[in-house]
Image (cartoon, grey):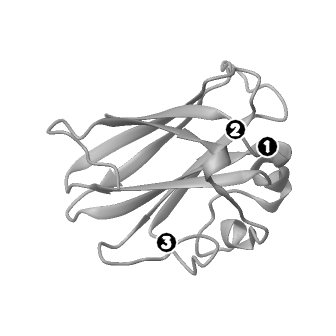
Amino acid sequence: MIQLNDKAEASVLGNLADGKTISDLSWAWSSSNACFPETQVRKFTGKHQLFEFEIPARTEVQIILTPKDKKHDMSLYAYMIGIGTDAVVPNLSRCIRCEADHKWDRPKAGKTQDHRRIVGDILAIQNPYKVIIGVAGANGLAEGEFSLEIKRK
């Protein structure tokens, strides 16, 4: 479990080699999770390494994934569940919120993308929640070092 500091921030290092392959990704595009569409499945076919932390009430954070090697294509997702809930993908029947970022298929007007992936809008209003972060290799990527930063917005 990642421990946030007094400012609700943290950083951690990881490696996809320490993760697991998740063959059934249908949880991601189910209407009760809506994390990423099935058309983007290849961007999540490598190993997944999961992390968790508790987001305090009245807190909004942004999660930034930075691969050590800029050539390693990695994707990022984060979902919120209730404290005391142990719903971990692929056995995620529903979540409160799920956000994902991956390499774009085409440019977006007025935006540029680099090797980093960023998920924002992780927000707890009145109650704290558990947040599960997933770092996944794209196109079957099974190893690669990375850093995760959790920053308060």
Element under disc 1: loop
Most extreme residue toward the left, as rendered? 6
Please state which of the two labelled residues, at mark 3 or mark 1, is closer to the viewer. Answer: 1
Residue 41: x, y in percent? 81, 56
Q: Residue 31: where, in percent of width, then height? A: 65, 74
Mark 3–mark 1 distance (CA, rounded to whole Å): 26 Å
Image quarter (top left, top right, bottom left or bottom right) of the N terminus: bottom left
- Element class at badge 2: strand
Mark 3 / mark 2, whichever is N-terminal: 2
- Nearest to the observer: residue 41 or residue 127: 41
Give x and y (percent) for residue 34: 63, 64
Is label 1 in contact with label 2 (beta carbons under 8 Å)? Answer: yes
Residue 95 marker: 3
As drawn, the label of residue 74 is 2
Describe residue 142's horizontal placement relative to residue 135 as left or right: right
Q: Earlier in the sequence, mark 1 or mark 2?
A: 2
Mark 1 is on which residue type? Leu
Badge 3 or badge 1: first in the primary sequence? 3
Looking at the image, which is closer to me, 24 or 35? 24
Residue under pointer 1 = 141
* Relative height, residue 90 to residue 14 (above, below): below
Task: Give above or below for 126 relative to 86.
Answer: above
Q: Residues within 10 Å of mark 2 (few under 14, many from 20)?
A: many
Labels 3 & 2 near each other (Cβ < 8 A): no
50 with respect to 1 (left or right):
right
